[in-house]
Image: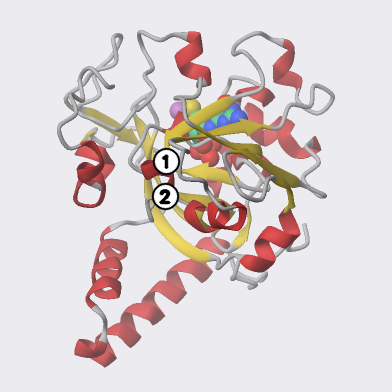
Amino acid sequence: MAHRWTNTLSDTDVTPEAAFLNRRQMIAGVAAGVGLSLTARSAQAETEAEALTPNSWDDITTYNNYYEFGTDKGDPARNARTLTVSPWSVTIDGLVDRPGDYAFDEIMAKMTIEERLYRFRCVEAWSMVVPWNGFELADLLDLAGVQSEAKYVAFETVLRPDEMPGVRYPVLDWPYVEGLRLDEALHPLTIMATGIYGRDIPNQNGAPLRLVVPWKYGFKSIKSVVRITLTDKEPPTSWNKANAREYGFYSNVNPEVDHPRWSQATERQIGGGLFSPRVPTLMFNGYADEVAGLYAGMDLKKNF
Ligand SMILES: Nc1nc2c(c(=O)[nH]1)N[C@H]1C(S)=C(S)[C@@H](COP(=O)(O)O)O[C@H]1N2
Ligand SMILES: [Mo]
């Protein structure tokens, strides 16, 4: 597929992960050379990036949850090819100064695409590390101008029965919907991903743009977004509507709050091999330093 936009890497004669890892080494080399002239922030980001090894392109693009294309992990890679992702636009409405349909290409022209290497933890207790490309959701919301009464952000996935074989089955109440509190949405870790390994994000991963909230269970990271609505009320969310006892609005990764049917204390790392031991799950998926303050004083067992 041709590159839709500026998802940075263009090497086509090397595997994406080889290109990515080479570039990482280059960045690390340069960083070592300039030593103290690095800002504290980029030095810390580099240290964190060093500690994480991304999953392979294959892992990330063949082991998916995208129920609109089927409920088996391999279904989205097989069935999502037919999703039309261009042209695309996102309606931004509700409590904003400039409501309207924002064309994907116009959004991309205005946004700064960055690489973010994030842990990704599914509520099913498996995890990956993904080198996303994308932009901060806060920057997109700025385009529309968030009004002061707004307290929440609601998201909606495209619904196209002709292109989505899974929506014949009432597994969820389609379209897939999600939501964040406004402060969560504006947090700098919250991104809209448009690429992986510098390439356009594949359909099975939520093309052409999907939310990524790395400190929450994967199902909050809604795919193929067509509508973003600013509201003053907590919006309904698909998994909460399906089973409110098992899936809360917040769904922050929390090893101390188990799912009613399984433990959340540990996780299985995808790509680790058949006999690799489970690893401990980290509070807020390892992002506690950055996000714990959002929940100061809240009972995280009640607000699961
Ligand atoms: N529209 C939509 N978004 C979705 C889902 C889905 O079924 N439909 N699955 C969620 C779940 S449960 C997970 S774990 C992640 C998986 O993202 P990935 O396939 O890119 O790893 O997408 C989330 N976003
Ligand atoms: Mo998930």
| Residue 65 is at least partly visible in this image | no
Q: Is mark 2 within 8 Å of ligand 1?
A: no
| Residues marked 1 and 2 touching at CB (< 8 Å) | yes
- Locate residue 286, reporting x and y percent: 24, 46
| Residue drawn at x 50%, y 12% as measured from the top left | 241
**Quarter holding residue 64:** top right
Q: Taking 116 as reference, is 73 left or right? A: right
Q: Is residue 197 left or right of residue 35?
A: right
Q: Is residue 86 above or below residue 233?
A: below
Is residue 169 something that shows in the picture? yes
Residue drawn at (46%, 25%), measured in percent from left and top?
233
The residue to which callout 2 is attached is 186
Name the side, left or right, on which 265 lies relative to 6. Answer: left
Where residue 54 appears, x then y in whole percent? 40, 55
Between the residue at mark 1 and the residue at mark 2, the CA separation in whole angstroms equals 6 Å
Q: On the rendered structure, is 3 left or right of 262? A: right
**Vertical placement of residue 202 versus 126, above or below:** below
Q: Which residue is mark 1?
A: 182
Q: Quadrant of residue 126?
A: top left
Q: Dot 2 lies on which element?
A: helix
Query: What colour scheme was applied to this rendering of the protein?
Result: secondary structure
Quarter of the figure with the N terminus: bottom right
Dot 2 alpha-carbon crowd within 10 angstroms: few under 14, some 14 to 19, many 20 or more: some
Name which quarter of the figure residue 254 lies in.
top left
